């Protein structure tokens, strides 16, 4: 018996999104009444029908489902068995049954009875979006394939096809028997047939049957859509599915690369001549004749078919890329027609020789054919008047114009052949590159092309209307500001552009195929994209050389002489600006590299006025800045010193955006110290027990005493003397002091208890490891552990100097400059970062004793 107590009171309007539920009632009205009565009369006499939801068995126990029905204000009742269906039939209600499982006997009975059946996800989605229940003439479990139109091809088993069609209907999809432009997805069991070819030509996604099965497994997920790219791309039919390829005429390296790509794209490969091969890929520029007679089943295609299939992410049609033998009868006939073995062959040879000579004089030295830019339509090179006696100045000017024209053609090739197709919307298989990657690769190339097209037009006008007094320098002075604006962004980031191309070519097979196809075209002159993009880097120095040459062949009386000097000067300023801007850019990049490499590095290290000066690898010789024997890296910046130690263990990895990977940080941040806190730089003398050692006498702002940090340099590339001078120079610049030499103090290692003995011995490393493990992870960090003996000796020297006593020669040699720390310590120093709150404090006695030093 139905649970009628659960019937909710609602308004009289139906909850279905389709009004066709009235069809059954309208059909009962006689034809005579339909002809006589008006539509308004029919509506008045027909009973109002409401939508009522029947919760079948387990669905009636779902509280979330009941809550959703109340939100969309639909009445519902619960039903325990199929026998209750007849008792629930009522002319006042349109019943919609909710079934938890579309494969059990209850569902089958309701389906046979032509009942309207839906699944719980449909109700939950409607409640979430505030929409009415969708009308469906078939059972609808979820809406993950709603609005998808699907066609099938290549299925021979009827049972499998019926199963797939049923699942698509259960998920809201629509099936079409014939393929047309309205089909959104083709589910293919093979890579042949007319439907497959049409889908490839229209760019329709071609899916494996597993796509439908996996989508059905996720039918209960809220807001899941089977057409989202991340899910759909997992089940796309790869270009070389069911294909076995062989390669002829390629180098070993290229053949290995193509075989790897074949595997990645779902295919297989075998040696040339194997009967199981479906395709023979031929390098048409090398192979002139096949080593065997191919069978009728074997496709013999050019390499463009291979790369084109990868680029469009679907198997391309073979008929467009069939390989034709070089010795075909048609070709022989055409060659015979062009043969020079005729009675007039001598005259033809002479004419050919003259033509070649003319071409060698006037032909463009670039391998790039002219792109016929818009600005070139007004005149051609043939229209260029040749003076009766060609001057050296005219020859250089013509060379300048020709190289500028070649350069414009190269830039146009880069944009038309590479950038525009990559930016084009609606690419087959989706975008080849992301917009940010395209921007990184091409940068300001369009702006450079625009400016140089104008320069070329002005040069062309000058050459066409040539006169020795014409000013070429004015043309480059006219666009000098534009050159300063457009070139630095491209030149400075050229290395990044190059790295992006190499990375994308390795990680994205479709981009690799795109480059292979375009670079084989004559427009590229057999040059790679990287080789083409380096031209803007080389152009300005080339122009400067040509202008210098032009100046040499310009007389002193010619007014263009001084103008050319100004133009050359402006180009040098542009190149200087580029170099300076590049230096700043590289310095900023180095700082970012430090931030990425050092875990916990303070964010305020990033600053527009800061630059990295030197990196030094050292070992700590004292208890500070970390345990003795720890590997410490010092990053010297122009105003601060970053101290970092080697991480004992890398925990986790750096998470980066999809498609980008970065290695985990190898260093751990210890302290970011302003150079103003360094009061003295101690050069420790070389002894048997002490090599490459130095120390820093530091006054932290939160401490009452100086702190001694001692290190041993481990890298041999940078001499210790050069490193210490470099450090002192930047310290002096920071504190606005001219005498950087006075900051260096030479000391004996015994004076400060510094030694490097046994730093690399096995016993020493073992003892350090035991010491590390015995300490707590949260041990206190201190900068106030300067050796007592060194401080006492410094204190005594300071006191003796103050009392007027002459120190001994030994004391003079050791402590003559240390007393001057009091003068440096008194200088206020802005701190970049406050020292950690967990610094240890020395006893009041030690603090009072060190006060005399400062």
Image (cartoon, rainbow, N blue to C red):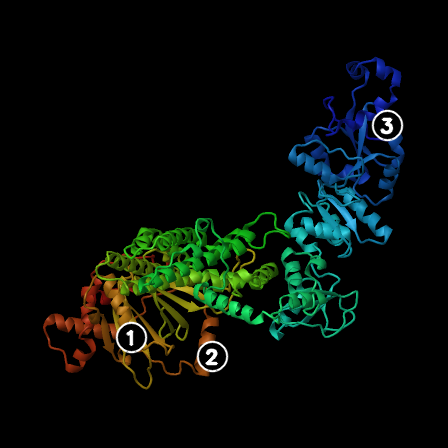
Residue 693 locus on image (x, y percent): 32, 77
Evaluate whether residue 645 shows in this view. yes
Which residue matches tag 3?
A: 89
x and y percentages locating residue 619 in the rendered image: 38, 74
3 or 2: mark nearer the eye = 3
**Mark 1 and mark 2: span between their CA atoms?**
33 Å
Q: Nearer the viewer, mark 1 or mark 3?
A: 1
Q: Are marks 3 and 2 in contact (CB under 8 Å)?
A: no
Q: Residues within 10 Å of mark 2 (few under 14, many from 20)?
A: few
The residue indicated by pointer 2 is 766
Residue in the foreground of this view, choosing between 825 and 259:
259
Q: Position of residue 12 (x, y in %)?
A: 74, 21
Badge 2 marks a residue whose secondary structure is helix
Q: Quadrant of the N terminus?
A: top right
In front of the other: 307 or 221: 307
Q: Quadrant of residue 844?
A: bottom left
Q: Is residue 776 visible?
A: no
Q: Residue furthest bottom?
A: 688
Q: CA distance from mark 1 to mark 3?
A: 97 Å
Disc nearer the start of the sequence (1/2): 1
User: In the image, is residue 4 above or below residue 533?
Assistant: above
**Disc nearest the viewer among 1 and 2:** 1
On screen, 707 above or below 4?
Answer: below
Residue pointed to by mark 1: 722
Question: What percent of the width, then of the height, locates residue 295?
Answer: 79, 68
Determine crowd level at label 3: few under 14, some 14-19, many 20+ residues with C-alpha closer than 10 A: few
Residue at 64% over, 51% down: 428
Bin the neighbour count of mark 1 within 10 Å (Cα to Cα): few under 14, some 14-19, many 20 and up.
few
In contact (CB < 8 Å): disc 1 and disc 2: no
Q: Is residue 563 left or right of residue 542?
A: left
């Amino acid at each position: 018996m139905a649970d009628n107590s659960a019937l909710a009171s609602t308004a009289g309007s139906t909850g279905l999104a389709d009004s066709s539920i009235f069809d059954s009632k309208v059909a009962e009205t006689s034809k005579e009444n339909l002809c006589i009565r008006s539509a308004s009369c029919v509506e008045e006499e027909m009973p109002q029908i409401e939508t009522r939801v029947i919760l079948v068995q387990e669905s009636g126990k779902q509280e979330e489902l009941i809550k959703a029905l109340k939100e969309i204000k639909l009445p519902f009742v619960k039903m325990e068995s199929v026998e209750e269906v007849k008792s629930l039939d009522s002319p006042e209600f349109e019943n919609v049954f909710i079934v938890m499982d579309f494969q059990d006997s209850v569902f089958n009975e309701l389906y046979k009875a032509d009942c309207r059946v839906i699944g719980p996800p449909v109700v939950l989605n409607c409640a979430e979006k505030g929409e009415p229940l969708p009308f469906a003439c078939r059972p609808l479990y979820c809406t993950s394939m709603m609005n998808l139109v699907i066609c099938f091809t290549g299925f021979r088993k009827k049972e499998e096809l019926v199963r797939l069609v049923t699942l698509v209907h259960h998920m809201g999809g629509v099936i079409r028997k014939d393929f047309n432009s309205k089909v959104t997805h083709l589910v293919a069991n093979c890579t042949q047939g007319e439907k497959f070819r049409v889908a490839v030509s229209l760019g329709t996604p071609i899916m494996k049957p597993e796509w439908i099965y996996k989508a059905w497994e996720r039918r209960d997920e809220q807001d899941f859509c089977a057409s989202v790219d991340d899910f759909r791309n997992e089940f796309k039919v790869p270009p070389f599915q069911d294909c076995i390829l062989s390669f002829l005429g390629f180098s070993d390296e290229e053949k290995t690369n193509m075989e790897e790509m074949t595997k990645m794209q779902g295919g297989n490969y075998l040696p040339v001549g194997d009967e199981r091969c479906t395709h023979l890929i031929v390098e048409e520029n090398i192979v002139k004749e096949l080593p065997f007679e191919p069978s009728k089943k074997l496709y013999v295609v050019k390499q463009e078919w291979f790369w084109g299939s990868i680029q469009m992410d679907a198997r391309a049609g073979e008929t467009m890329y069939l390989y034709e033998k070089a010795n075909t009868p048609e070709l022989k006939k055409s060659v015979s027609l062009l043969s020079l073995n005729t009675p007039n062959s001598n005259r033809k040879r002479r004419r050919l020789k003259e033509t070649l000579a003319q071409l060698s004089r006037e032909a463009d030295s670039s391998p790039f054919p002219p792109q016929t830019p818009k600005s070139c339509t007004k005149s051609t090179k043939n229209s260029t008047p040749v003076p009766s006696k060609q001057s050296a100045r005219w020859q250089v000017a013509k060379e300048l114009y020709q190289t500028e024209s070649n350069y414009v053609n190269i830039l146009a090739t880069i944009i038309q052949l590479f950038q525009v197709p990559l930016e084009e919307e609606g690419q087959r298989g989706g975008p080849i590159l992301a917009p940010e990657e395209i921007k990184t690769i091409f940068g300001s190339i369009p702006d450079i092309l625009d400016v140089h097209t104008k320069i070329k037009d002005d040069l062309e006008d000058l050459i066409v209307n040539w006169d020795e007094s014409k000013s070429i320098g004015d043309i480059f002075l006219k666009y000098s500001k534009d050159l300063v604006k457009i070139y630095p962004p491209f030149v400075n980031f050229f290395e990044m552009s190059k790295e992006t191309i190499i990375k994308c070519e390795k990680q994205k097979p479709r981009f690799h195929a795109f480059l292979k196809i375009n670079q084989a075209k004559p427009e590229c002159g057999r040059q790679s994209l990287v080789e083409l993009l380096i031209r803007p880097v080389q152009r300005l120095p080339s122009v400067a050389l040509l202008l210098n040459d032009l100046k040499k062949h310009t007389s002193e009386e010619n007014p263009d002489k001084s103008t050319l000097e100004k133009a050359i000067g402006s180009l040098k300023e542009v190149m200087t600006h580029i170099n300076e801007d590049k230096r700043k850019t590289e310095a900023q990049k180095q700082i970012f590299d430090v931030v990425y490499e050092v875990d916990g590095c303070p964010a305020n290290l990033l600053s527009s006025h800061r630059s990295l000066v030197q990196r030094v690898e050292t070992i700590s010789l004292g208890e500070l800045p970390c345990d003795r024997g720890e590997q410490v890296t010092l990053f010297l910046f122009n105003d601060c010193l970053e101290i970092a130690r080697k991480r004992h263990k890398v925990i986790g990895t750096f998470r980066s955006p999809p498609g980008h990977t970065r290695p985990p940080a190898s260093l751990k941040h210890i302290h970011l110290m302003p150079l103003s806190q360094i009061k003295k730089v101690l050069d420790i003398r070389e002894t048997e027990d002490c090599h490459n050692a130095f120390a820093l006498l530091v006054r932290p702002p939160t401490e009452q005493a100086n702190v001694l940090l001692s290190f041993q340099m481990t890298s041999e590339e940078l001499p210790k003397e050069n490193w210490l001078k470099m450090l002192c120079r930047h310290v002096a610049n920071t504190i606005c002091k001219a005498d950087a030499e006075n900051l260096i103090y030479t000391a004996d290692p015994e004076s400060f208890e510094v030694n490097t003995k046994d730093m690399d011995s096995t016993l020493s490393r073992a003892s350090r490891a035991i010491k590390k493990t015995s300490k707590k992870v949260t041990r206190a960090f201190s900068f106030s552990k300067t050796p007592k003996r060194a401080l006492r000796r410094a204190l005594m020297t300071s006191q003796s100097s103050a009392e007027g006593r002459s120190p001994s020669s030994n004391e003079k040699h050791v402590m003559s400059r240390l007393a001057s720390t009091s003068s440096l310590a008194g200088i206020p120093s802005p701190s970049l970062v406050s020292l950690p709150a967990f610094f240890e404090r020395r006893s009041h006695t030690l603090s009072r004793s060190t006060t005399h030093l400062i």
